[in-house]
Amino acid sequence: MPQLVSCKKDNGVAVITIDNPPLNVMSRQVQQEMQEIIGEIKNDDEVVCVVLNSAGTKAFMAGADIKEFPNMIGNPEMRTQVMEIHAMLNEVDNLPKPTIAVLDGLTFGGGCELTLTFDIRIAEEHATIGFPEVKLGLFPGGGGTQRLPRLVGEAKAKEMMYTGEPISAEAAEKIGLVNQVVSTGEGLETAIKLASQIAGKSLQSLSRIKRAVDEGLDMTLSDGIEREATLFSEVFQTEDVREGVEAFIGKRKPNFKHK
């Protein structure tokens, strides 16, 4: 069985590619391989930033593999299988490194839910994004009902999921679902450029930025400030903060070791 998810590393950036033609659907094999690669990246000190893209130009990921659905109907182990998917998505979401997803075509259902676990989303202008599950008598079951409202607000999230109708990349940018829209064919290049810029920073600070924001969103403002203060105190105990300050004073570029 051919591998459907691959990873290449260069200068602190890991580029993950999903290649499951024709529409790069989220099959169990894709799910398992993604989880394995994320686990490797988590413990790889050479990787600072992660980029996700997919092969082809028609679809980033057109949702789950519907051919697997008949085996799920009436299956008493259904919830266990769903939680296995959530385990993979949560690992991506909780990866202590900045992540960028490139939406370079149809991004539907489970594909959109996967991108919601990434920190930054870059869409090519021809991409369409949506949650069509309701048209099958289903609803988003990969975290869509939880992550989408937190990103675009309750009303817009419900509208997208109630109707099942996709929106354009431009519309997605307007509601904050994607960070930026680029020309067709330029998504990966744009993402790698941004990732390379981020990879030049200290992972000690980047990981704490991510934790402060993600954990703070589930706290009151006062509790979030307390959490930020703890993380800010921690970063001052690292080797990188010493290097950063000395480099600034010495008017040179810092050489971060991520320690």
Image (cartoon, rainbow, N blue to C red):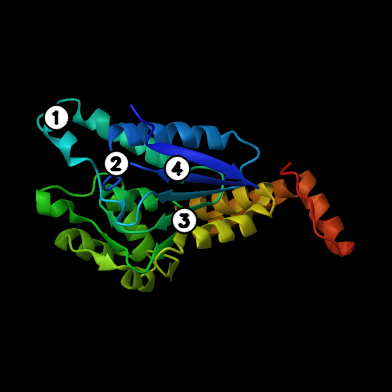
- Give the spatial CA distance, label 3 vs label 1: 37 Å
Asked if the residue under mark 4 is in contact with the one under mark 3, i.e. CB atoms within 8 Å, the reply is no
Residue 66 location, x and y as percent? 17, 41
Q: Which residue is mark 1?
A: 71
Mark found first going from the N terminus, 4 or 2 = 2
Q: Which residue is mark 2?
A: 26
Please name which of the two marks, 1 or 4, marks the residue nearer to the observer.
Answer: 1
What amino acid is at disc 4? Val
Please name which of the two marks, 4 or 2, marks the residue nearer to the observer.
Answer: 2
Asked if the residue under mark 1 is in contact with the one under mark 2, i.e. CB atoms within 8 Å, the reply is no
- Give the spatial CA distance, label 2 vs label 3: 28 Å
Please name which of the two marks, 3 or 1, marks the residue nearer to the observer.
Answer: 1
Q: Which residue is mark 3?
A: 217
Is residue 34 rendered to the left or right of residue 79?
right
Q: Is residue 217 above or below residue 27?
A: below
What amino acid is at disc 2? Met
Residue 25's label in the rendered image is none
Mark found first going from the N terminus, 2 or 3 = 2
Crowd tier of the residue under label 2, counting other residues whose Cα lies within 10 Å: few below 14, some 14–19, many 20 or above: many
Please name which of the two marks, 3 or 4, marks the residue nearer to the observer.
Answer: 4
Q: Which residue is mark 4?
A: 92
